[in-house]
C-alpha cells in the first residue's frame, strides 16, 4: 500500500519534472483555520478564493481556496500532511497561471442536474474526485481537465491515490470550461456511490462515535465497505435506514444478518419501502415478544 509521504513526494517531483505549476485546491469547510495555516506558512502566499466574485462570495473563507505551491516546497508540508487524515482537498499540476486556473475552476463550481436545478459541484473533495473516475463521468472530465493538466488526491479512508489525467500538452491556449456543466442521472448515481461510505462513516462519527474510536481509519473503511455491500444487497438506500442498520451492525457484528427478526424486517421493507427500518424492527420484536408470551 502506498504511503502518504511517498505519494506526496512523487507527485511534487513528477510535476516539477514536467515543468508544471503545482497547486493545492483546499476546502475551507473542512478546516476552519485554513487561511491561518496558509498565511502562517508563507508571508505572501499566492492564493485565491473560488467563491470570490460568485453568488457565494460571503462564504469565501469557508469555500475552496486555490493555492500555488511555489518557492520552497517544505514551507507547505505542515499544511499538506493534513491531507493524510481528512479529505481537505486535491493537488493539481497545470501549465496555467494562478489567475487563469482560478477562473477555470470557478466555472466548474456550477452544475446543472438532470432535473434542471443548479447545484454546487464539489469536485475538490477527494471522495467526489474518486467518483469522477467512473465512466459515467467521462463528459464532465473532458470539459474540466484540460490538456497538460493532472489532478491528484489522497483518499484518507482508503490510504490510496486517485489520479485524473488530462490530454497531452497542447500548444493551443487552454479553454475555459463551459459554465454549468450538465450532470445527468447516471453521473449523479456514480457520485452517490463514491460518497456513500464516507457519508455513512461521517454519520456514525456524529451520532455513535465510541465504537469506531477503537479502530484505525482504514479498519473503519473496510468495515463500512462490507456493511455497504449488505445494504446494497438488500436495497437499503435511505440515509436513516442505513444509519440505523450501521448502528445495529456495530452492536451485533456479522451475525446481525442471520437474525430471523432482521430478515423479517428487511423483507417487510422491500414490500413497504415507505416504512422506516426502525419502525419495522420495533414491530418485529414486539410480535416476537407476544408470541413468546403466548408460548
Image (cartoon, rainbow, N blue to C red):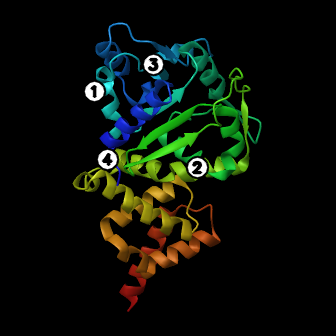
How far is mark 1 from mark 2, CA to CA? 31 Å
Q: Is residue 241 left or right of residue 79?
A: right
Residue that badge 1 annotates: 78
Which disc is residue 3 wearing? Answer: 4
Which quadrant of the figure contains the C terminus?
bottom left
Label 2–label 4 contact, CB within 8 A: no
Label 1–label 4 contact, CB within 8 A: no
Of the numbered discs 2 and 4, the one sitting upstream in the chain is 4
Q: Residue at x 51, y 43 (%)?
A: 163
Check disc 2 and report its element: helix, strand or loop: helix
Which quadrant of the figure contains the N terminus?
bottom left
How far is mark 1 from mark 4, CA to CA? 16 Å
How far is mark 4 from mark 3, CA to CA? 24 Å
Q: Residue at x 50, y 25 (%)?
A: 19
Q: Position of residue 80 (x, y in %)?
A: 34, 30
Residue that badge 2 annotates: 192
Residues packed near mark 2 inside 10 Å, few (<14), some (14 to 19) or many (20 plus): some
Label 2–label 3 contact, CB within 8 A: no
Q: Position of residue 188 (x, y in %)?
A: 66, 47
How far is mark 2 from mark 3, CA to CA? 30 Å
Residues packed near mark 4 inside 10 Å, few (<14), some (14 to 19) or many (20 plus): few
Residues packed near mark 1 inside 10 Å, few (<14), some (14 to 19) or many (20 plus): few
Which disc is residue 280 wearing? Answer: none
Residue 88 can be seen, yes or no = no
Check disc 3 and report its element: helix, strand or loop: strand
Residue that badge 3 annotates: 68
Check disc 1 and report its element: helix, strand or loop: helix
Q: Seen from this angle, which residue lies furthest left?
A: 214
**Front label number (1 vs 2):** 1
**Front label number (3 vs 1):** 3
Amino acid at each position: 500500500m502506498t504511503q502518504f509521504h511517498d505519494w506526496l513526494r512523487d507527485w511534487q517531483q513528477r510535476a516539477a519534472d514536467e515543468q508544471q505549476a503545482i497547486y493545492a485546491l483546499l476546502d475551507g469547510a473542512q478546516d476552519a483555520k485554513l487561511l491561518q495555516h496558509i498565511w502562517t506558512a508563507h508571508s505572501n502566499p499566492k492564493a485565491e478564493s473560488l467563491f470570490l466574485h460568485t453568488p457565494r462570495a460571503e462564504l469565501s473563507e469557508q469555500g475552496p481556496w486555490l493555492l500555488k505551491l511555489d518557492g520552497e516546497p517544505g514551507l507547505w508540508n505542515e499544511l499538506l500532511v493534513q491531507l493524510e487524515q481528512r479529505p481537505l482537498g486535491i493537488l493539481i499540476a497545470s501549465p496555467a497561471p494562478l489567475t487563469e486556473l482560478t477562473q477555470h475552476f470557478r466555472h466548474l463550481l456550477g452544475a446543472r442536474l438532470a432535473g434542471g436545478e443548479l447545484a454546487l459541484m464539489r469536485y475538490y473533495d477527494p471522495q467526489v474526485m474518486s467518483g469522477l473516475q467512473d465512466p459515467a463521468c467521462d463528459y464532465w472530465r473532458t470539459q474540466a481537465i484540460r490538456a497538460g493538466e493532472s489532478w491528484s488526491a489522497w483518499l484518507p479512508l482508503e490510504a490510496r491515490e486517485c489520479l485524473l489525467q488530462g490530454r497531452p500538452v497542447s500548444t493551443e491556449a487552454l479553454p475555459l470550461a463551459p459554465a454549468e456543466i450538465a450532470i445527468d442521472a447516471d453521473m449523479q448515481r456514480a457520485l452517490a456511490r463514491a460518497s456513500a461510505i464516507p457519508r455513512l462513516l461521517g454519520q456514525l462519527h456524529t451520532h455513535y462515535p465510541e465504537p469506531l474510536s477503537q479502530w484505525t481509519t482504514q479498519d473503519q473503511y473496510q468495515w463500512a465497505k462490507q456493511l455497504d455491500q449488505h445494504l446494497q444487497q438488500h436495497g437499503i438506500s435511505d440515509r436513516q435506514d442505513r444509519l440505523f442498520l450501521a448502528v445495529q451492525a456495530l452492536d451485533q457484528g456479522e451475525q446481525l444478518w442471520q437474525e430471523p427478526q432482521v430478515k423479517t424486517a428487511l423483507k417487510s421493507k422491500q414490500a413497504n419501502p415507505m416504512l422506516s427500518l426502525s419502525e419495522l424492527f420495533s414491530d418485529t420484536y414486539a410480535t416476537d415478544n407476544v408470541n413468546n408470551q403466548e408460548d
